[in-house]
Amino acid sequence: GNDFVLSVQLVPFDSTRKLLLTRDITQLERVQTVHRDFVANVSHELRTPLTVVGGFLETLLDMPDMDASTREAQLKMMFEQTQRMQRLVEDLLTLSRLENGVEARDERVDTPGLLQLLASEAQGLSQGRHRIALKLDSPVQVRGNYDELHSAFGNLVSNAVRYTPEGGQITLRWQQENGAPIFSVQDTGLGIEAQHIPRLTERFYRVDRGRSRATGGTGLGLAIVKHIAQRHQAKLDIRSELGQGSCFAIHFPPNRVVEPEAQLSKA
Ligand code: ADP
């Protein structure tokens, strides 16, 4: 903050310069607001489960003779809240790693294999409540970071499961369009109103806070997906219709394709 003010004073008056500085200050203020909001959001997200856990602990300490079933119910709720905090902290660490630009090693990712793994993970999450389909329309592999792509695709899959009511269909697809590989997850779930779509990748932006929380959401999933896509020069495309379902697609540039037999040069 202070360095910035000092540099303003050192600059001789000149109308173009002044305009430029005004714009920089506006931008700085915006960055500061985003940062403040973020800290406030994180604090709030952590305070809620902490309050719940603290409250139950107090009851348990005050009532040593509590009956076993009540005690068990309370312990279970405390456990769920600590898991929620853990997920949040893990997502925050993932985001911070991505934002600090820590270089991830590129490797050859067996994308069809990864999709098969994701489809079985989807089965696990869905527990038979949805039909899960896998469409491997392309055999191509891509150059990228396996763990990051697993995490990005996995976030889209878990969202599809969480925002699709029982009986719905979830389709994982790997295809190529004009040489460009595309990973997509299509669901027949709740869908999203158009006005929300541009904001979905903002940290902690949720259409329905209650539903997100109830299904274990941290509000950071799509922010993570967007970062990972960017690091792979890929684009996240979101299409959705309220009450019909959604399709989240990651479009990779054609130069990310690696031939199955090609060796990646070791860095
Ligand atoms: P969350 O942890 O809340 O799911 P995300 O960043 O993954 O956070 O998603 C942000 C919001 O986007 C969600 O809260 C939800 O409102 C909406 N959303 C994401 N995926 C879907 C989907 N497949 N169908 C409907 N809404 C979705």
Image (cartoon, rainbow, N blue to C red):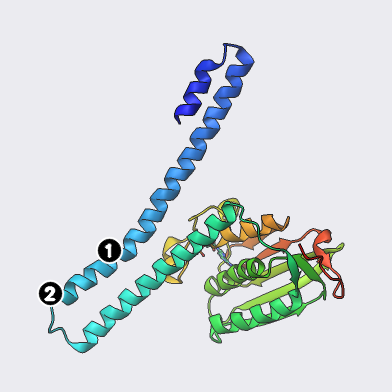
Q: Residue at x 15, y 83 (%)?
A: 66
Which label's residue is closer to the chain start, 2 or 1?
1
**Secondary element at tag 1:** helix
> Would the CB of label 1 be found within 8 Å of ligand 1?
no
Residue 21: x and y, percent? 57, 23
Which picture quadrant has residue 233? bottom right
Q: Which mark is residue 62?
A: 2
Vertical arrangement, residue 54 with respect to residue 123, above or below = above
Vertical arrangement, residue 217 with respect to residue 22, above or below = below
- For this orientation, the residue located farthest to the front is 267
Q: Looking at the image, which is closer to me, 209 or 83?
A: 83
Q: Looking at the image, which is closer to me, 100 or 78?
A: 100
Amino acid at circle 1: Thr
Residue 24: x and y, percent? 57, 29
Residue 190: x and y, percent? 55, 68
Which picture quadrant has residue 79? bottom left
Residue 115: x and y, percent? 70, 77
Q: Quadrant of the N terminus?
A: top left
Label 1 sits on residue:
51
Amino acid at circle 2: Asp
Which picture quadrant has residue 58? bottom left
Q: Is residue 193 visible?
A: no
